Amino acid sequence: MKKYLLATVLVSVMVLGACDTENTTVEEVQADNKEANDVNQEANNEKEANKEETGNNVNEADEKEDAKEEFGTRHNPVEHKKAVTINEENWLFGEATYEMELIESVSGEEAEQMVADGNQFNDESGEGKEYILAKFRVQLEYAEEEPFDVNPQQFDVISSGGSSYEEFISISGLEPEFRSDLYEGGEVEGWVPFLINEEDEKPLVKYGDVWFDLRGE
């Protein structure tokens, strides 16, 4: 009987010991799994952060590229004293490449005086109007058909509201005049007159497909 009780006690102790061992093993496995999950979560978080940073860098690069492509447009016109290289193709000259710059512009009383001094028969700007005189420079790099004609009639002036000024003006005596037949390497610099509304604060001038800030203020 004692042997039987002793054996029973030993079996019970072994069973309890096995249970304790099994519980410990499960806890250790759970702890290991939790640690692995934490590592995986950190790796996922790092991947997401890298993906977000990469996406931001791509977006910034795209924005910079867009800004570069939009330079010289109505919403991002060329500033004064900023030389740009223009490549164009038209029915008259074929393909042509030239450098162009709006050097300066004059308006108000100074422009009125320059017009009056140029020729006594030049018209005054008139009520509600004003002259803006813009000095441009063009240097021809290449033209499929020479000579390459440059003259003031090739410009369009656009109001800040988006309407073109259609009134034809003829001002003589402005020196130097923006007019020449250019051959490869040739350059011309001269004044181009524009007549606009006095209250027009942001007029733009367009030459081919390139837009310039006329006032430059």
Image (cartoon, grey):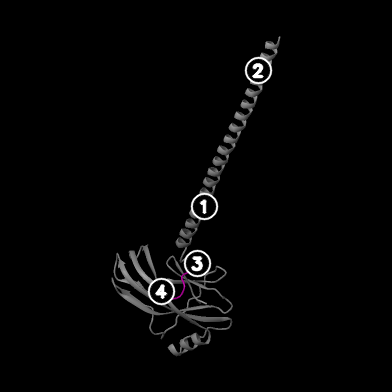
Sequence-first disc among 1 and 2? 2
Q: Secondary structure at mark 1?
A: helix
Q: Secondary structure at mark 4?
A: strand
Find out whether the residues at labels 3 and 2 contact each other: C-beta distance under 8 Å: no
Of residues 163 and 204, the one nearer the viewer is 204
Q: Is residue 207 found left or right of 22 in the rendered image? A: left
- Marks 3 and 2 sit apart, C-alpha to C-alpha, by 92 Å
| Dot 3 alpha-carbon crowd within 10 angstroms: few under 14, some 14 to 19, many 20 or more | some
- Marks 4 and 1 sit apart, C-alpha to C-alpha, by 39 Å
* Spot occupied by residue 65 in the image (x, y as percentages of width and height): 46, 59
- Marks 1 and 2 sit apart, C-alpha to C-alpha, by 64 Å
Which residue lies under the disc numbered 3?
76
Q: Secondary structure at mark 2?
A: helix
Which residue sits at x=52%, y=54%? 56
Sequence-first disc among 4 and 1? 1
- Marks 3 and 4 sit apart, C-alpha to C-alpha, by 15 Å
Residue range highlighted in magenta: 75-82
Residue 119: tell me if it is visible.
no
- Marks 1 and 3 sit apart, C-alpha to C-alpha, by 29 Å
Magenta includes 79? Answer: yes
Which residue lies under the disc numbered 4?
101
Find out whether the residues at labels 3 and 4 contact each other: C-beta distance under 8 Å: no
Q: Nearer the viewer, mark 1 or mark 2?
A: 2
What label sits on residue 53 in the rendered view? Answer: 1
Which residue sits at x=55%, y=45%? 45
Sequence-first disc among 1 and 3? 1
Sequence-first disc among 3 and 2? 2
What label sits on residue 10 in the rendered view? Answer: 2
